[in-house]
Image (cartoon, rainbow, N blue to C red):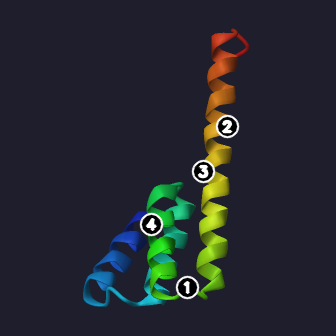
Amino acid sequence: QKRYGDITAVSARLGEWPNDLNLLFLRGVLYSSVLNFNSAIADFDKMIKMDQFNSLAYFNRAYARFKMVEVIKSLDLSKSSVNEGRL
């Protein structure tokens, strides 16, 4: 629950300072921590548009994409196990 409040607070700050790379980074990491990978990737994409040499943005975007694929695969495995009567 706390992380959702943190996301709200950082989003409010971004309303005041929309070009703050540190705030975008923080919100992207917070989004990743609550498995909201699409929003995290969007924040990291914004960072890259603002600073194409920001290695943290590239790394964290790649990590969020990787984790998103892992979650999707996990859900697919669970779904197939249920369909096969294993769960």
Crowding around mark 4 (Cα neighbors within 10 Å: few <14, some 14 to 19, many 20+) is some
The residue under label 4 is 42
**What amino acid does circle 2 point to?**
Lys
Q: Which mark is residue 68?
A: 3
Please say if the residues under marks 1 and 3 sit with CB atoms less than 8 Å apart: no
Q: Distance of mark 1 from mark 3, alpha carbons?
A: 23 Å
Q: Residue at x 68, y 46 (%)?
A: 70
In this view, the residue farthest toward the top is: 85
* Rendered position, 81 above or below 45: above
* Rendered position, 65 above or below 55: above
**What amino acid does circle 4 point to?**
Ala
Q: Residue at x 26, y 89 (%)?
A: 16
Q: Residue at x 51, y 73 (%)?
A: 44
User: In the rendered view of the protein, which quadrant contains the N terminus?
Assistant: bottom left
Which element type, helix, strand or loop, lies under badge 3? Answer: helix
Q: Which-is-in-front pick, marks 1 and 4?
A: 1
**What amino acid does circle 3 point to?**
Met
Q: Distance of mark 3 from mark 4, alpha carbons?
A: 13 Å
Q: Distance of mark 4 from mark 2, alpha carbons?
A: 22 Å
Q: Residue at x 46, y 80 (%)?
A: 49
The residue under label 2 is 73
The residue under label 1 is 52
Q: Which mark is residue 85?
A: none
